[in-house]
Image: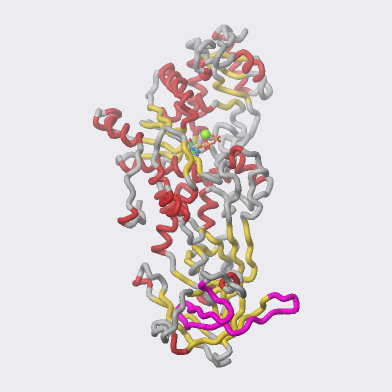
Amino acid sequence: MNDPKSKSEDEEHVAPTNFIHKIIEEDIAAGKNDGRVHTRFPPEPNGYLHIGHAKSICLNFGLAEQFGGKCNLRFDDTNPVKEEEEFVHSIREDVKWLGFDWADREFYASDYFGQLYEWAIKLIKDGKAYVEDLSADEIREYRGTLSEPGKNSPHRDRPVEENLDLFARMKKGEFPDGAKVLRAKIDMASPNLNFRDPVLYRILHAEHHRTGGEWCIYPMYDWAHGQSDSIEGITHSICTLEFEDHRPLYDWCLDTLGVYHPRQYEFARLNITYTVLSKRKLLQLVTEKIVNGWDDPRMPTISGFRRRGFTAAAIRDFCDRIGVARANSTVDLALLEFCLREELNKTAPRVMAVLKPLKIVLTNYPEDQVEQLEAENNPEQPEAGSRQIPFSRELYIEQEDFMEDPPKKFFRLAPGKEVRLKHAYIIKCEEVVKNDAGEITELRCVYIPETKSGQANAGMKVKGTLHWVSAPHAYETQVRLYDNLFSEIEPDKIEIPGSLNPNSLEVLADCKLEPSLKDAKAGDRFQFLRMGYFIADVKDSQPGAPIFNRTTPLRDTWAKVQKKG
Ligand code: ATP
Ligand code: MG
């Protein structure tokens, strides 16, 4: 990894446990695999990658890096019905963006279709697989349950020659989808349901994104995965917990074939509060146009987080902090935002932007005068220097920074009250102007010339400092604010749309930004003082006309959670 992780010393956390790291250390000490470490990240190209995948990517590529090993990118493309080239491209882009490199080791399960077929024939010849005519429903019925053993299929004892013939004809396309499958012959009474003659091949007359019309039978996950690992010389095959019950079958296939045998390890998948990580539901959000595509900034996809303004370093830092365990748990979304703020606080230039403007006229400021005031770019980074911002008679402040009838502890602007304008002067509100409907349209204020920023407060006590933008110089643009896409803390438990937050997107059409922001390039990140971190949207920004997305507010809920806890 090139860029250093942004962790200040006082925030340095205790290294979280990663039990797989320990296993590999022991394996190396014991001289297993000649000290080789070779992992793989095996996405199915049937959707965009999400933050859960990021955990798996960081784990697999991270372990390879830590032990001087290798990690392959392997597309697990065994289901032509759901897989598309678009997803392959997005997966490549996302893994790269996260900062990982698979060099020339981009593989596809479909690369091995020929070998997997040959191995299936070997299994048939050894009397360990048979062609099944029962329907999917009948197979399920015959399988039994956890408390009852299964029944042997009437086709289980077909002679080898007949199996070979039928399997060859399945491959030739003589049978329609679902008419037959190839099953391993293991044990219909096994307490592990995966051992009750699992299906290895099914018929699917469908165009495959890579092999086209070459095949009409496709291997199941259990037949493809371990053998692909074996072919690639994987040493540690790391997957999520739901595959634990498949491990005996993983081992059975490799042992029965007598080929190189990698080891499978399972870890708990990532769950995050207020976040859906089910591919089915993410696809539903996209196809039902509940969001604007896979990279909608509210999506928990890697491309969504990227467009929202999250950095790869923050996501890697997050994956580091959550650790790798075997017990399922749910991580607070606020931790991810905390990691992000940690980084952006150090790197994002500070600027001023008024999102919901309220006009102010400084009645004692000369009409045609414009002052250029000095504003530091980043107090955390003195070398970032400063810039000039224009100040004039007409300004905008945030609507919420004024109250006509404020409560006691309101330290912002109110009639007769004073505040400091950041980088500028102290002002005092003298008059509230309203329209016929009684809405406030403008404030009339005076500025105190002796209180220019950097000088003394002229003996005045002000508690509040507001951001502002000079009205005639403002860059007007659209800014989008986001909230959780789901209002349920565990949205995976409720079907869409029941779990949706109706206020997840707020589009502000009439924001007033300091003029320097007109030149922001797509993808540039900023801290809008007091309002949060923002990014110039990479899709909708035009040169000289950027549009901004709020990445995250400044409020740090994680720190609060930590304190309370
Ligand atoms: P599918 O139901 O389509 O298999 P999947 O989420 O398992 O969905 P894959 O493309 O198969 O998607 O996942 C690729 C890799 O990422 C797998 O090794 C999988 O275990 C891992 N992975 C997926 N979701 C998570 C998650 N939430 N946390 C950690 N790892 C995950
Ligand atoms: Mg999967």
The residue at the point 52 percent across, 86 percent down is: 447
Residue 227 sits in which quadrant?
top left
Residue 562 against residue 391 in the figure, above or below: above
Q: Where residue 107 sits in the image (x, y, percent)?
A: 46, 37
> In the rendered view, does 88 fall on the left or right side of 180?
left
Magenta run includes residue 428: yes
Q: Where residue 351 sits in the image (x, y, percent)?
A: 48, 72
Magenta run includes residue 369: no
> In the rendered view, does 182 fall on the left or right side of 385?
right
Residue 492 against residue 7 in the figure, above or below: above
Q: Where residue 299 sits in the image (x, y, percent)?
A: 57, 50
Residue 391 against residue 354 in the figure, above or below: below
The residue at the point 52 percent across, 45 percent down is: 273
Residue 524 against residue 386 in the figure, above or below: above
> In the rendered view, does 379 fall on the left or right side of 206?
left
Residue closest to the eye, 363 or 278:
363
Q: Where residue 210 sits in the image (x, y, percent)?
A: 56, 37
The residue at the point 42 percent across, 83 percent down is: 457
Residue closest to the eye, 5 or 74:
5
Residue 99 in view in this figure: no
Q: Which residues are magenta?
A: 411-439
